């Protein structure tokens, strides 16, 4: 094989690898991102713990459903109290709906009494694209071995109505409960609903 042909094959392989969408059962891709307090977080630093990734846009009616009702904050408090790492990820680009500065996000979390482990600012969309995050909210659960065990909607009622929360099946809690009990996750994927993630164009 000629040298140029070999390099072309390498280039194609790299392209295919970089376009590979993460799937449930795969190792969750590692990343590094800064939080709203200026601290760096890597997914790999939480190896040995369950991790929830929550894609967020405070201007999205579907996100507002879960925050104005207190549902998301309740989930954050419940699961972080059990040792789960909860990372809120904001992939809105500057000038797009949901984009916030670090101070804006801290003010918002204080106002909403939100308590994730950290709010990660991802204005270039690197983390969002790594996970193919499509909506706000879009939820992912990673187990202590670093394997993705859930990818999809927060729950089974794809509406903006707060009244639907109490009768919906919460897929995130279900995945955590089942996995912590040593059982397979009965709904490992679902179709995420919400506003599209406002990536940079």
Image: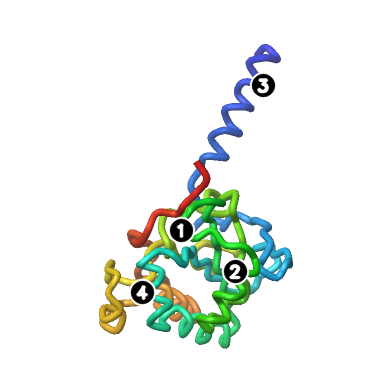
Quarter of the picture containing the N terminus is: top right
Can the viewer see residue 42? yes
For the residue labelled by badge 1, is the local secondary structure a helix, a strand or a loop? loop
Q: Is residue 96 above or below residue 57?
A: above
- 9 shown above or below 184: above
The reply to whether discs 3 and 4 touch (Cβ–Cβ < 8 Å) is: no
Mark 3 → mark 4, Cα distance in angstroms: 50 Å
Q: Position of residue 111 (x, y in %)?
A: 53, 81
Q: Which residue is mark 4?
A: 65
Q: Between residues 71 and 189, which one lies in front from this camera angle?
A: 71
Give the residue at the far top of this rendering.
2
Say which element carries label 3: helix
Residue 24 marker: 1
Query: Which mark, by number, is residue 7?
Result: 3
Q: Secondary structure at mark 4?
A: helix
Within 10 angstroms of label 1, few (less than 14), some, or many (20 or more) residues? Answer: some
Q: Is residue 156 left or right of residue 132?
A: left
- Viewer-side label of 2, 3: 2
Assign a secondary structure to mark 2: helix
- Structure colour scheme: rainbow
Q: Which residue is mark 2?
A: 104
Alpha carbon distance from label 2 to label 3: 46 Å
The residue lying toward the viewer, choosing from 182 and 100, is: 100
Say which label, 1 or 3, has the lower sequence index.
Answer: 3
């Amino acid at each position: 094989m000629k040298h140029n042909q070999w390099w072309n094959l390498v280039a194609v392989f790299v392209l295919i690898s970089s376009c590979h969408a993460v799937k449930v059962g795969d190792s969750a891709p590692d990343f590094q991102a800064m939080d709203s307090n200026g601290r760096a977080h890597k997914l790999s630093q939480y190896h040995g713990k369950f991790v929830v990734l929550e894609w967020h846009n405070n201007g999205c009616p579907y996100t507002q459903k879960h925050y104005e009702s207190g549902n998301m904050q309740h989930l954050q408090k419940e699961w972080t109290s059990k040792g789960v790492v909860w990372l809120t990820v904001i992939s809105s680009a500057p000038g797009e709906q949901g984009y916030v500065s670090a101070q804006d996000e801290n003010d918002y979390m204080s106002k909403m009494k939100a308590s994730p482990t950290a709010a990660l600012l991802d204005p270039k969309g690197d983390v969002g694209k790594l996970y193919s995050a499509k909506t706000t909210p879009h939820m992912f659960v990673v187990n202590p071995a670093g394997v993705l065990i859930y990818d999809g909607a927060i729950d089974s009622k794809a509406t903006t109505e707060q009244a639907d929360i109490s009768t919906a099946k919460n897929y995130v809690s279900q995945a955590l409960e089942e996995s912590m009990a040593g059982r397979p996750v009965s709904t490992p994927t679902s179709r995420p609903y919400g506003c599209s993630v406002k990536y940079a164009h």
